[in-house]
Amino acid sequence: MRAEMRVNLYIDRDTFLHRLHPQVKLGILAATFASIYAIDRPLLVAPAPVALGLLLFAAGAAGNARRFAPMLLAVPVATFTMWSLFYGYGANAAAAPPRSEAMEFAAAMALKLESFVLSSLLCLSITRVEEFTEALRGLGVPYRVSFTVAMAFRLVPLFLGSALSVVTAQRARGLDFSRGSVLARLRRYVPVIVPVFMGALRRADAMAMALEARGFGRRTRRASFVRSRLAPRDLVVGAALAAVVLAYLSAWALGYGRLGGGR
């Protein structure tokens, strides 16, 4: 149970974002990727991570942001460093971009990756697994595919819980995972990987039999206990997302969002 709480990102709150239709929640994620993907100017990308950060706090998911704070800091810093060093690498002296353009592009890439991480974190914080499955089925995704995605979300906490139990058992037998070099520590995790892997195979086999016993293989129309209806707030949010995507796509098409004259 402890391991599941550590990996489950959904925050059970009754906020405006939680009450949105599941497809609108996925629309926030899709709109983030579609709007800023081709934009290279940091001033145009910057509003996206700021807005997503505010939405995280509005959804009561500040705890998730704190849990992922190292990644939220490391991703933009590493991205900015790499792109500022290697932007335009390989071009001849005449065609090499100016240094200011390299810094702008690096900042935009860092902000874009930060936005992608924040939007994914927001989606997982306000969307239950059942809602995610319903949204996929509403978009025409086959039932088997949506069910597989839902099971992946369900099984990750289970496997991590098994790994935590094995680690605890090995520590009780005197195995110290914190002593020695990095390679020595990795070798000590072999006794953990083997039982977790074998347990995963047993669970997969048992789950397959349980699903077949419940008629999963029958080719009939599937029903769902989770049924959401579009509300006026969903239409308003959907229209706002469409307007944002249209504005960013227009900026990209007109060349305002690209560096170096749109090359």
Image (tube, rainbow, N blue to C red):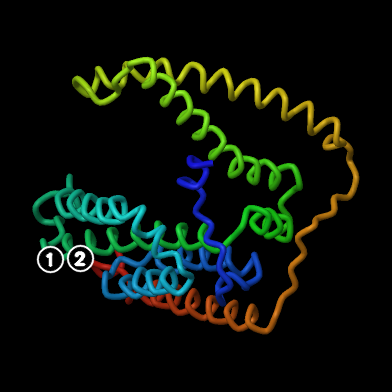
The quarter of the rendered structure image containing the N terminus is top right
Cα separation, mark 1 vs mark 2, equals 6 Å
Mark 2: give few (<14), some (14-19) or many (20+) Cα within 10 Å.
Answer: some
Image height of 133 relative to 178, above or below: below
Residue at figure coordinates x 51%, y 34% from the top left: 161
Image height of 177 relative to 107, above or below: above
Q: Are marks 1 and 2 in contact (CB under 8 Å)?
A: yes
Image quadrant in which you'd find residue 231: bottom right
Q: Left or right? Give the position of 200 relative to 125.
A: right
Q: Residue 123 placed where, x, y %?
A: 52, 61
- Disc 1 is placed on an element classified as helix
Q: Residue 115 placed where, x, y %?
A: 38, 63
Mark 1: give few (<14), some (14-19) or many (20+) Cα within 10 Å.
Answer: few
- Disc 2 is placed on an element classified as helix
Q: Nearer the viewer, residue 101 or 83?
A: 83
Q: Amino acid at mark 2?
A: Glu
Q: Left or right? Give the position of 232 relative to 55.
A: right
The residue under label 2 is 104
Q: Nearer the viewer, residue 11 or 235?
A: 11
Q: Nearer the viewer, residue 45 or 170?
A: 170
Image height of 195 relative to 44, above or below: above
Give me the disc on residue 167.
none
Residue at figure coordinates x 61%, y 42% from the top left: 154
Q: Residue 126 placed where, x, y %?
A: 55, 64
Q: Residue 220 placed where, x, y %?
A: 90, 45
Q: Nearer the viewer, residue 211 or 241?
A: 211
Give me the disc on residue 100.
1
Residue at figure coordinates x 31%, y 21% from the top left: 186
